[in-house]
Amino acid sequence: MIKKKYKSITFAIFLAILFYSACPVFAALEITGYPNIPGFTSPTEGKLETYVSYFFGFMCYIAGAIAMVSFAVGAVQLIMAASNPSLVKEGKDKMTSAILGLILTISAVIILKTINPALVEVSLDVLPLTDGIYYKNGDKYKTAPVSEANTSNIPSGYETLYYKCSSGPALLIWKFPKTNFAGNDNNYRGVTVVRKKCGDTENLSNIKSFKTSFETSGIYYCMAGCNETGTVCSGYMSESNASSGELSAPFKNNLKSIRVVNDLSGDLHYGIIFHSKDDPTVTSSCSRIFYSSDKNKEIECFSNISISNSSTVFFWNDKDYKLSGQGVDFYSEPFGWAKAARAGKYSLTTDKIKDYWNGAPTELSLDYTGITRPSGYKNIYQQFQQHAGSIKIKGNYVVILRSGAFCQVFFKDIVNLKSTEITATNTNIEEIDVIPVK
């Protein structure tokens, strides 16, 4: 008797597991024309909760039907038993069990509906969207990838990209006219870049591929101009750059403008200078220095860039220039800081440099106090330009020496200026830039 009881319980559990595992299968079949079951909602396509509720009711009716059949079988058996006591008892037991099962089924539904109708009318609340990028179709959303090489893979009707966030960096979206992130030519003509903030959407129709990236601080190279605020470029744009070196295609020797994006909260302000040679450490034609002179400006655009084979990138220390070091010393002799050099000296102090110093070497008057030199020597070489020997960089500074259109960039001591390319290829140093960096 006990074994029979356990078999019944095991069979009931098996049926329950079979029922719930079958629900997703039924949902996937997308069957239409379900019969109406009084008291239960018909399944709605795509909503699992309506399938669960419907099939719960369906199983209840099936249980009732089985109970009625079992009752009828017991009644027939009771009639046919005649005077056989064992068959009479078996028939009565079947009828009793059928009635009891039917009562229990009806009672279960009534009790559950009385306690809480939601227990039989299952509902699945839609979870709120987490921060991220989604395809949007009305009030429906699907998670979107960070890039899509072929927009034909986008689900039909979901051609709108939605940037969900409460706060965070801007989202940059590159829109390509061809698949596999290609432009109309090697210069990426036809590519556009848009900048989106939290809650913004962007239509992806009429493009063949796209990629996204969160905007970070750094320098962005542009193949065309950019607007006054620097928020977007009118053509193809690189991702963030923060290192010096040779520029890659298509920007090398083909750059038109740049976006400088500073990190105001992290106190990172970018500066950059471009060179006509692939190696930014050698002497070459140079651009001017590009950086945001406004300490509170997060994004700034610079156009009309004519030199762009390589670049030198630095972090401008504009918050507290005194933290960069003790300044820069200029000497009339190589290794001028050595006692034996007997060099004249000019000290460009932190208070003179401040955020940025630019001047001519004629402004650097050499001091020979305590130095034993003939008066004729001292009278002839009174300025650094007249006898440029060496430069001592006492801390974190970038020193740029210019002669005409040429320049050379230094971050470390120049022990002998006569051995540098800038003085070997050009007679005089005409201009000097000193910038405190991090």
Image (spheres, rainbow, N blue to C red):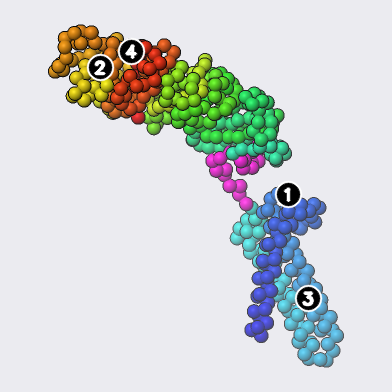
In percent of width and height, residue 416 lies at 30, 22
At horizontal 39% and vertical 20% (from top left) the residue drawn is 421
Which quadrant of the figure has residue 271? top left
- Indicate the position of residue 424 as horizontal and vertical percent values: 38, 17
Residue that carries the numbered disc 4 in the rendered image: 359
The residue range painted magenta reads 124-145
Do the numbered discs 2 and 4 sit on residues whose CB atoms are within 8 Å? no
For disc 3, the neighbor class at 10 Å (few under 14, some 14 to 19, many from 20) is many
User: Residue 70 got which mark?
Assistant: 3
Which element is circle 2 on? loop
First in residue order: circle 1 vs circle 4: 1
Q: Identify which amino acid the numbered label 4 is placed on.
A: Gly
- Label 2 neighbour load within 10 Å: few <14, some 14-19, many 20+: many
Image vertical order of residue 318 relative to residue 84, above or below: above
* Residue under pointer 2: 332
Mark pair 1, 4: CA separation: 75 Å
